[in-house]
Amino acid sequence: MTLLANLTLVLLSVIVGYIVLRFLSKTSLIHVLKKWWRFLAEKCYVYQFYKVPKFNEHMQENQLYRKVYVYLNSLPGVEDSDFTNLFSGNKSTEINLVLESNQVVLDNFLGARLYWMNEKTSSESLILKIRKNDKRRILLPYLQHIQTVFDEIEQKRKEVRLFVNVETELQRNGRWRSIQFTHPATMDTVVMDTDLKNKIKSDLENFLKSKQYYHRLGRVWKRSYLLYGPSGTGKSTFIAAIAKFLHYDIYEFDLNKIADDSDLKFLMLQTSNKSLIVIEDLDRYLNEKSTAVSFPGISNFMDGIFSCCGEERVMIFTMNSKENLDPTIIRPGRVDVHIHFPLCDFSGFKSLASSHLGLKDHKLFQQVEEIFQIGGEFESC
Ligand SMILES: Nc1ncnc2c1ncn2[C@@H]1O[C@H](COP(=O)(O)OP(=O)(O)OP(=O)(O)O)[C@@H](O)[C@H]1O
């Protein structure tokens, strides 16, 4: 009986296989895809994003098209597609995948399936199909999601720049001068306690995702860090690593080149969103009163109304010591996170030996550890 059932199953499979093969040999794969696409069209709402407005092709490129185009080409489905074009990007190591014309890519969002097609006829356009049941629920959130992903991709692509302020008299081209920021430090190369480094990384990542949270509480979307510790312990290097991690430009305020409090506000107004606002050695400026900017001028800069211009700012202040300071300057609100940079200890030394020399262990390590314990000093050789 079982043998008979098995034989019937095999026979049926052969017949079905034969019919499918006959069907495929008569109709090309493209034909099948087109039929499927037409079938979807009946069950879905269709949206078309033209590269340039259809009614006037001399107008500028449609920005929404550009955003959707960048978003689509970042979907994993493009990589899996049978027809994908490869282009080199702006950076020498960058390779971009671009969907071939008339290919369909699937996307998932909040449990809904979305179908995209890159249509190239007389004009270029991207076509989105959303099932009728899903449209009301997801269309707007989906378009916002595309915008957010696009912003993230653009942010990662752009080169990081370092801005420094110059004297008033050079005002012709604005007060900020910038160069490409090529510092080699990254979060991986900075030596610090691993738990602390991970906490800071997740604090920064949470900050990036918290726009709604800050707005809901009526707070400006910014976060301030104080890096303090003796000279040469890696504070400036860590700022470089944060800039790379966030892909943010750095605006480094040199308070010696600022004429007065209103000049400081003026410079702040000229900085851009998604940037690091940095004042190094803040304690020196405050203790030595070596700047024309007043104490209230600096405090207001840190959390006053002018620190609120723009959005998505990370402010970083460095100091050698928090002692002998008016505590109000680093009170919560002005500074959200305090990060201590201690002198190198034995574990830091081992990390440096590993990253610089590839040494995980060495016969002299025990001796080095003893020297750290008795607080001895190393002579450079
Ligand atoms: N924790 C660290 N991890 C990696 N490199 C470090 C570290 N600490 C110091 N260095 C190296 O030592 C040098 C001095 O570091 P850096 O300028 O960042 O220190 P700093 O704390 O900002 O000093 P200062 O307070 O004098 O400005 C840099 O070349 C840096 O690469």
Image: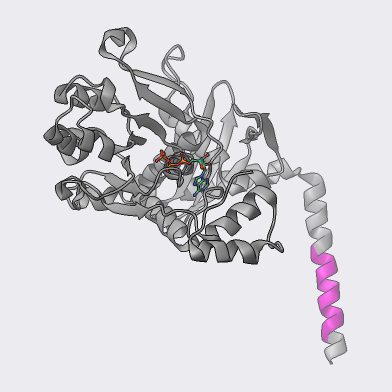
Q: At x 25% / y 23%, what residue is drawn? A: 267
Image quadrant assignment for residue 29:
top right
Residue 159 included in the magenta stretch of the image:
no
Read off the magenta span.
5-16
Q: Nearer the viewer, residue 15 or 63?
A: 63
**Residue 58 location (% of width, % of height):** 45, 11
Reply above or below: 295 against 269: below
**Residue 77 location (% of width, % of height):** 61, 48
Q: Main secondary structure of the magenta part?
A: helix
Q: Is residue 137 visible?
A: no
Quadrant of the rendering where the N terminus is positioned: bottom right
Residue furthest to the bottom: 1
Q: At x 35% / y 30%, what residue is drawn? A: 252
Q: Nearer the viewer, residue 243 or 147?
A: 243
Quadrant of the rendering where the C terminus is positioned: top right
Reply above or below: 192 against 171: below
Reply above or below: 152 against 170: below
**Residue 279 location (% of width, % of height):** 31, 35
Tally the marks: 0
In the image, is 204 to the left or to the right of 38? left
Q: At x 43% / y 60%, what residue is drawn? A: 196
Q: Nearer the viewer, residue 149 or 25?
A: 149
